[in-house]
Amino acid sequence: MSAKQPPLGLIAGLGDLPVRVASAAAERGQGVYVVRLKGFVEPALDHLPGEVIGFAEVGKIYKAFRAAGCKEICFAGNVKRPDFSALKPDMKGMLLLPKVLAAARKGDDALLRTVVEAIEEEGFKVVGAQEASGQLLVGDGLLAGAAPGDEALADLRKGAEIAAATGRMDIGQGVIVCNGLVLCVEAQEGTDAMLQRCAALDTSLRGTPEARRGVLVKRPKPIQDHRIDWPTIGVRTVEGAAEAGLTGIGVESGGALILDQEAVFARAEALGLFIYSFPKDWA
């Protein structure tokens, strides 16, 4: 660990993103201290210093980061909304809980903004996973696979429009469209579960591995704080889309992270899917 660079504080859930954030910190010579949220402990982070702390043990989280010397905090990983009635807050958590409950009624983004504001009021700086991981936000146009045809482009445009609308209502970041029909809208279940739900639909509604059709579209919520909950695509996303019979994935230009881009693009090409980055003004 560099004596001049404080360790990065990582509030981690499950998945590849917190692992990438931790690896990027190590590559630049920065230490990492991981607060593993109880119930969502990512095994790939077990080798790093840190501790498991409950959602509502807010004072304990602050104390742990201060003791580790952290100045910057990053949120990364998949975490489900907790059962608020089952939380066991400490004193700091009890003071924050009324604001959190009020924000939670408005949606996940409002909830996360409240948490970020509380952390910054304690003197920490919250940094985005895209900054902490060193991952580049996707650019314009075709990223992998064959160029989408007219039907796929029409589905991408409709998906972008639907995702913008549901994002404004703080519902989710993703949607699946096939031949102009909205098959699934992402809500609390997350992208992987939405793709599984799509794969369970009758093949009269969706594509198949032999005759692919339909697209997954992901874009940021227009209202969200871009330091948290950034749309992310990984190999698992590509494989889930393939199992659902989709022909491709669309993401907003400058509005998504693709983890391990080389592997993701190679997997998409191997499975016969495209990945396409559409303009921000598709709404």
Image: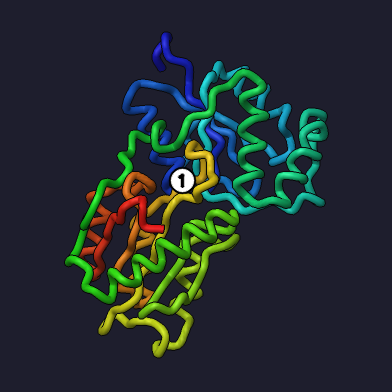
Q: Amino acid at mark 1?
A: Trp
In the rendered structure, the answer to whether residue 246 lies left or right of residue 93 reads: left
**Which residue is painted at 47% across and 57% down in the image?**
164
Residue 46, visible in the rendered structure: no
Work out whether residue 70 or residue 26 is closer to the camera in this orientation and state it: 70
Residue 63, visible in the rendered structure: yes
Work out whether residue 270 or residue 245 is closer to the camera in this orientation and state it: 245
Q: Residue furthest top?
A: 4
In the rendered structure, the answer to whether residue 80 lies left or right of residue 2 reads: right
Give the colouring mode of the picture. rainbow
**Which residue is painted at 60% across and 46% down in the image?**
109
**Above-or-below relation of 272 to 31:** below
The residue at which mark 1 appears reads as: 230
Q: Quadrant of the C terminus?
A: bottom left
Q: Quadrant of residue 55?
A: top right
**Above-or-below relation of 74 to 253:** above
Q: Horizontal and vertical percent for residue 125?
A: 54, 23
Q: Residue furthest left?
A: 146
Q: Horizontal and vertical percent for residue 143?
A: 22, 55
Q: Quadrant of the N terminus?
A: top left
Q: Residues within 10 Å of mark 1 (few under 14, many from 20)?
A: many
**Which residue is painted at 57% across and 62% down in the image?**
187
Number of numbered discs present?
1
**Above-or-below relation of 236 to 96:** below
**Which residue is painted at 54% across and 32% down in the image?**
34
Q: Horizontal and vertical percent for residue 223?
A: 54, 46
In the rendered structure, the answer to whether residue 221 lies left or right of residue 87 reads: left
Q: Horizontal and vertical percent for residue 47?
A: 47, 35
Q: Secondary structure at mark 1?
A: loop
